[in-house]
Image: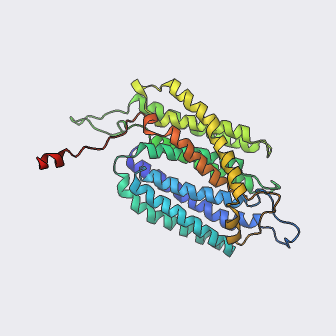
């Protein structure tokens, strides 16, 4: 993927995520805050589903900016710092209870400006050689977060806005998955590249196949999203896990090296087995631990929302997905799995020569 295309795609997806966050705050969040005396009745599991969708949108902003900067550290750091600050702003804005079209526009504009300001910091790193392991890891995290978005539920599941909001967020994360994996692919001649004699250098067959694989993953992913959301609530874990397995296997197909122009299928088979077990296992484990520790309860209190009743759990599914995605990326996005040998540090030969 050419640097200009990668930069434009990353910034564009981050802008879409900022708009989704604004809609989630002013349109969806009020739906999750029932009004009334809560001395006897308190909210239950998944009441604040809009908060998880907003947090997923914030993570998508960071992923888009990491993609725009080519995964390099001097681009990833501003993106991560922006996401951390955005989460703090989210809690403060949630406490203010904004609603209405005017508030939606104001928050969307503010979010887009924040994305634009950070995008200027990652523009120069985007022109340098991309960091393939970071880009592949970002794609892995986005793929696992797709699972979270498809699994979002509410206590009643009667809100007509829930399914469209979950599908929009999952679709955005799917786009980041495909774009990140494609950007992590080994470099190959770009359209319009010229030979030394001035004649055009055609796109390689391998590159065409990678683009075909990317298109196939996008189509299968979109169909899978709709099918998973069509399953009754409470029965979506198995089909969502299958969709996640397909997406992560697709990430390895796009991002890993192809010796002799063809995938090494046994390696991708092992990656598929890892993708089928590890993400869901990590998500469940993290959700149980964070639920026991009640890590989301302080955020609920700071946002001025009613606490979850003691019989249920205040769980951040977005946090579970993030940690599960990072754990999966440690196995599927290492330089060794990509076909890259880690670059050893250069020995201080010059210093030794000077001493002599």
Please report the residue visible at 60 percent of the width from the left and 36 percent of the height from the top: 275
- Left or right, 163 with respect to 257, comes to right
Q: Position of residue 83 (x, y in %)?
A: 53, 61
Is residue 113 shown left or right of residue 91? left
Residue 46's spot in the image, x, y percent?
A: 76, 56
Instruction: Find residue 58 and report its image quarter.
Output: bottom right
Question: Taking 171 as reference, is 92 above or below it?
Answer: below
Residue furthest out toward the front: 356
Farthest bottom residue in view:
96
Is 82 displayed left or right of 42 in the figure? left
Nearest the viewer among 349 and 44 is: 349
Q: Which of the 4 image quarters holds residue 344?
A: top left
Q: Residue at x 46, y 64 (%)?
A: 116
Residue 38 lies in quadrant: bottom right
Res 247 seen here: yes
Vertical side of 145 occupied by 87: above or below: below
> Which of the two residues, 106 or 298, is positioned nearer the viewer here?
298
Identify the coloring: rainbow
Position of the N terminus by quadrant: top left
**Camera-nearest residue between 200 and 131:** 131
Most distant residue in the right direction: 40
- Residue located at (62% from left, 38% from top): 278
Q: At which x and y percent is residue 349?
A: 19, 44
Q: Which residue lies at the image location 75% right of the left edge and 52% below the top edge?
A: 153
Asked if residue 171 can be seen in this view, the reply is no
In the image, residue 340 lies at what x, y percent? 39, 36
Count of numbered circles on the image: 0
């Amino acid at each position: 993927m050419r640097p200009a295309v990668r930069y434009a795609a990353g910034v564009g997806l981050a802008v879409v995520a900022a708009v989704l966050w604004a809609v989630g705050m002013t349109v969806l969040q009020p739906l999750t805050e029932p009004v009334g005396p809560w001395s006897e009745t308190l909210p239950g599991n998944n009441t604040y589903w809009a908060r998880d969708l907003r947090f997923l949108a914030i993570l998508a902003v960071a992923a888009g900016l990491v993609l725009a900067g080519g995964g390099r550290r001097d681009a990833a750091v501003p993106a991560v710092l922006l996401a951390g600050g955005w989460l703090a702003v989210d809690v403060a804005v949630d406490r203010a209870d904004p609603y209405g079209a005017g508030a939606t526009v104001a928050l969307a504009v503010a979010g887009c400006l924040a994305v634009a300001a950070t995008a200027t910091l990652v523009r120069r790193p985007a022109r340098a050689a991309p960091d393939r392991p970071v880009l592949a890891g970002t794609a892995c995290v986005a793929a696992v977060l797709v699972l979270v978005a498809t699994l979002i539920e509410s206590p009643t599941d009667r809100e007509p806005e829930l399914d469209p909001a979950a599908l929009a967020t999952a679709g955005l994360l799917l786009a980041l998955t495909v774009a990140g994996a494609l950007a992590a692919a080994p470099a190959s001649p770009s359209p319009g590249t010229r030979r030394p004699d001035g004649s055009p250098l055609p796109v390689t067959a391998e590159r065409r196949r990678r683009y075909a694989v990317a298109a196939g993953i996008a189509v299968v992913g979109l169909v899978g999203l709709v099918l998973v959301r069509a399953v009754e609530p409470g029965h979506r874990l198995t089909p969502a896990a299958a969709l996640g397995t397909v997406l992560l296997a697709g990430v390895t197909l796009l991002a890993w090296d192809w010796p002799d122009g063809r995938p090494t299928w046994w390696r991708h088979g092992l990656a598929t087995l890892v993708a089928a077990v590890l993400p869901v296992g990590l998500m469940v484990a993290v959700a149980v631990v964070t639920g026991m520790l009640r890590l989301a309860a302080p955020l609920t209190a700071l946002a001025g929302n009613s606490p979850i009743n003691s019989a249920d759990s205040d769980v951040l599914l977005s946090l579970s997905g993030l940690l599960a995605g990072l754990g999966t990326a440690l196995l599927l996005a290492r330089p060794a799995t990509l076909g890259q040998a880690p670059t050893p540090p250069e020995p201080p030969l010059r210093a030794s020569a000077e001493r002599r």
